[in-house]
Amino acid sequence: MGAFLFYLFKSALCLTTLYFVFRLCFRSDTLFRTNRLLLLGGTLCCLLLPFVQLSIPQASLWQKPMTTVETLLTTPPLTSPSMHLHAEGTEAEQPLPPTATVSAPATAAPAAFSALRLITWAYTGGGLLTLAFFLLSMLRMRQLFCRYPSERQQGFRLIVCPLKKGSFSWGRTIVLSQEDYRNNREAILLHEQMHLHYHHTADLLWMQAIIVLHWFNPAAWLLMRELREVHEFEADNGVLLHGIDATQYQLLLVKKSVGTKLYSMASGFGHSKLKQRINMMLKKRTNRLARLKLLLFVPVVSGTLYAFARPEVKNAVEQMVKPPVGTQSQDTVRLDERELLEQYFARKFKEGGGTVAPESGKAAHRLLVNLRNQVMIDQEGTPTDCADFIRKHLTEVLRKDYQQAKQSGQPFRSSLEIIYDRGSSAEAMRLYLYTVKEVYQQLRQEAAAELGTTDEAVLDKAFPILVTFAKPKTFRKTDAAEKLPIQITLIASNGPSKTLSNFTLDELRNEVEDFRSKHGETTVSLKVEQDIPMGMVMDVKGILRQAYVTRLNYSSAKAPSTVEETVKKP
């Protein structure tokens, strides 16, 4: 529900912007059809714009208010129920075994009462009440249609009501009072026929739907009023174009302005402000070039989308986790994304004041990954949707630790130990580590909003990223005779190339050394399948290190890299 409330917040901002732009720049124009289409199309765009997500290189002051509101509305409660893992014959500290099963607790603690829950109830109640009033108005109108006889006319149904009520139209039905039918039938009937001709009922239904959705937003109600006025201006203009005397018609408006209105949803002869309707009839026609004012919405929409934009997530993870300038890697083979993420956590561990990693099992929280890529956090886990589980559960436990540290006046020093099986896939570990990084970044944004600063040094003290890695419980070495599902291309600087596939580690070592000895400087392209075990990749890269590889073009089947790197003779 929090995501839906945030959508309502963004669409409400769009509707408010639309109302002010229309009020300032278009309301006085006599281009009634243009104004009508602007209101209808503009409200539709206001409902769709929040779904458009743009990425920007770096967040600015424009995005901070939106980020703060999104955090407040979409943050899950700390007491949300979680999944518990039970395994027979395994210790709690082990990765998820193949025999593990996942079950929900028999009873869950009720969610804490929160402001978000109150807002949800208030919004739902207001929407239902608004919808009830609309349905009641429709019911009363339907009863009126059924109570009195009707006469079929050309394209519509005419009902003459004996009660002294204002004339109106709805759908394909026109209701006239006996007084109007007897004294002013031609002008009033023609006016209502114009409403039917322009299909104003469909416009009102659309705006009513928006009001039910945005009943709390004054801009939605004001836009409905503006659309009603445009309807009356358009109908009045249609009447005059049919040859009705303008002076007599205006006098009739003055006479009927004191009439009552019963059905708020219908298009009635007495709707809208009398002075504005007469002024529009007397006003000089607006030049058609005034439609160029619609171009004003280009910067308005651009600014709105920029305010809704998010900092972009780079495809190259190394651009986000690269070490400080001047730091050089001692590894002779280019690091893949998983290793870069590990380096990022090691760097943030030092910047957060960490000196020595806690002993295995002594960290505040543990994230375990088994060879089936299943995860467990503090004896709770799931065999499916692991990244989503990490995002939700880790956010919950770290946020809870942070709140407890603030309440006790102690510094926040909650640590996380990550242990993964060497047989888990490289792509899964990259995804899991990146998810952990996202969790910490989100929580640090919340802390930054509380502290009123985005300074990294301050955040490293207030909410340090204390993530360490322990050696895996199991260590599966690649068999020397095992054929590896990896493709390697050797390209010499002078032109010759050679592609290797379905090879063993020994065959790879011999091929690389032989090719390098013959051709000297060589480019190596390494392509792996997305679900390949991480241990195989590590073993292949070990062979390339022994062959004095200084650079490597590493890619996966899902997202190939385009960086060219070289192998040189020692």
Image: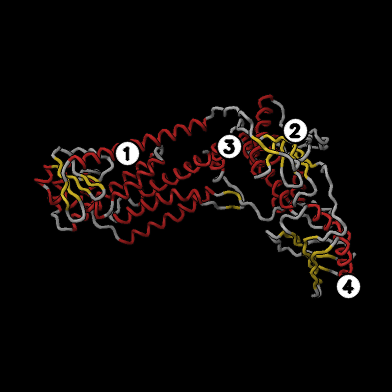
Residue that lies at the very extreme toward the left in this rendered image = 182
| Disc 4 from disc 2: Cα separation | 54 Å
Mark 1 lies on a secondary structure that is: helix
Bin the neighbour count of mark 2 within 10 Å (Cα to Cα): few under 14, some 14-19, many 20 and up.
Answer: some
Is 290 left, or right, of 327 in this rendering? left
Q: Nearer the viewer, mark 1 or mark 2?
A: 1
| Disc 4 from disc 3: Cα separation | 60 Å
Bin the neighbour count of mark 4 within 10 Å (Cα to Cα): few under 14, some 14-19, many 20 and up.
Answer: few
Bin the neighbour count of mark 1 within 10 Å (Cα to Cα): few under 14, some 14-19, many 20 and up.
Answer: few
**Amino acid carrying mark 2 in the image:** Ala
Q: Residue at x 64, y 31 (%)?
A: 105
Between 96 and 388, the residue placed more toward the observer is 96
Q: Residue at x 21, y 55 (%)?
A: 155
For label 1, the residue is 135
Whichever of labels 1 and 3 marks the residue nearer the N terminus, that label is 3
User: Is residue 495 depicted above or below 66 in this figure?
Assistant: below
Whichever of labels 4 and 1 marks the residue nearer the N terminus, that label is 1
Disc number placed over residue 518 in the picture, else none: 4
Q: Nearer the viewer, mark 4 or mark 1?
A: 1
| Disc 4 from disc 1: Cα separation | 85 Å
Disc number placed over residue 353 in the picture, else none: none
Whichever of labels 4 and 3 marks the residue nearer the N terminus, that label is 3
Mark 3 lies on a secondary structure that is: loop
Asked whether the beta carbons under mark 2 and mark 3 sit within 8 Å of each other, the answer is: no
Between 150 and 509, the residue placed more toward the observer is 150
**Amino acid carrying mark 4 in the image:** Lys
Whichever of labels 4 and 2 marks the residue nearer the N terminus, that label is 2
For label 3, the residue is 75
Is 45 left, or right, of 203 in this rendering? right
